[in-house]
Image: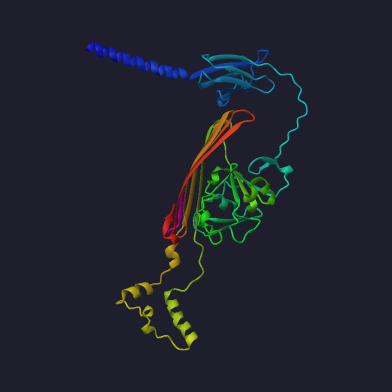
Amino acid sequence: MLMQKACNKKMYWLLALLFFGLTASSQVLIKGKVVDGKGEPVQKASVSIIDADNRIVSGTSTDIEGNFVLKNVNPKHRLTVTNIGYKTITVPVSDKTQFSLKMEEVQADLGEVVVLSRPVTSNGLVNIAERDLTTAVSKISARDLEEMQSASIDQALQGRLSGVDITASSGDPGAAMNIRIRGVSSINSTGIPLIVLDGMPLETEIPSDFNFGTADEQGYAQLLNISPADIKDITVLKDAAATAVWGSRASNGVLVITTKRGVVGKPTVNYTFKGSVSLVPKAIPLLNGDQYSTLIPEAFMNRTGTPLNTTTVREFNYDPNDPYWYHNYSNNTNWVDAISRTGKLMDHTVSLTGGGEKAKYFASIGYFDQKGITLGTSLKRINTRINLDFNVSEKIKFFTSIAYTHTDQARNYLGSNAT
């Protein structure tokens, strides 16, 4: 029995050493030297490790003697060396740990080089060079929106685009915005523009008994419930030419929204925080309770010509033996201070982007919390988005956009919370 236990213990140690040995061998350390055709060391050459998708996993540069060292290299990856004036070298890593690489010089005269850069604008379906545009278009990029604290895209666009009139239906957090492009075009329906998100019209579910003529904009509060941190750029199509692409739905204008997508490169994690504080502005000077109770009899006498008998009006008795009237009408309460507070806004966003030549990805998750300056008003939102792109060939490409948003909005004037 003792001998069997000793054998089992040795077997466990052997398996553990084998496991750690396999783990250590999966990531190796490689060294090497890069020289030119004359055997002279090549300085400052870029040495990179690339994976099967041509993504750079790690990299370094050669020192003054042409030497380089790379740690934690996967044997399945490839080693590439580049330098100006030399041909690029690409070799598999395999089981080698020592490399001796010779770079060949490239003898080529560089002729005249002309670099052309033309900005383009999207109409929701295709990109058009701005020099070829014949329509009225306004565009704003994400860089212009980065430093703004806003709960939705429409709030971020307010006052920043010519020809686009955006007004708030109320000052509560998450309140709907009234968007008008080229003014009001109908007297019996709303002038809401068409929203195009990543090439697809953004539809909203509207009840069959919804009255377009009398409804306020609060019913459209969730229309642009997209995190501003996920936006790449926004284009507004303002003239009637938009109907050639989107039909009659574009008669009120088109808001083309493009979200961020993945780029070729190693995974990159970004964290963004935005915060602000809202203070109640100084109110117009008001009368206190004593001043108001003095003003009422004076106003009564100015109107009727006879003095007001305050002994018969219970609001003016100030009788502690009458608790209801005494506590409700005998206190100098500042009701503006009683229902207001300091508003706070916090917006957290974490995003992950990367990809290779074939597949690219962008993922983000955000938490938004805003407390209004009026008690009982607030907005909490959790949103997440995943954008995937896959290139089959130069002519066939697939893209996927998945988004989820949960909003908890408190509106005191409704008597209940709206989620």
Viewport quadrant of the N terminus: top left
Tell me what residue is drawn at x 66 percent, y 40 percent: 126
Snapshot colouring: rainbow
Tell me what residue is drawn at x 64 percent, y 41 percent: 125
Q: Is residue 107 above or below residue 217?
A: above
Q: Quadrant of residue 214?
A: bottom right
Where is residue 154? Give x, y as percent.
Answer: 57, 52
Q: Is residue 9 above or below residue 389?
A: above
Q: Which residues are magenta?
A: 375-380
Q: Is residue 160 left or right of residue 340?
A: right
Q: Is residue 414 visible?
A: yes
Tell me what residue is drawn at x 39 percent, y 15 percent: 18
Q: Is residue 330 left or right of residue 160?
A: left
Where is residue 249? Give x, y as percent.
Answer: 62, 50
Where is residue 103? Give x, y as percent.
Answer: 65, 16
Q: Residue furthest front?
A: 208
Q: Quadrant of residue 165?
A: bottom right
Q: Residue furthest left?
A: 1
Where is residue 248? Give x, y as percent.
Answer: 64, 50
339 falls in the magenta region: no
Q: Is residue 262 visible?
A: no
Q: Residue furthest top?
A: 3
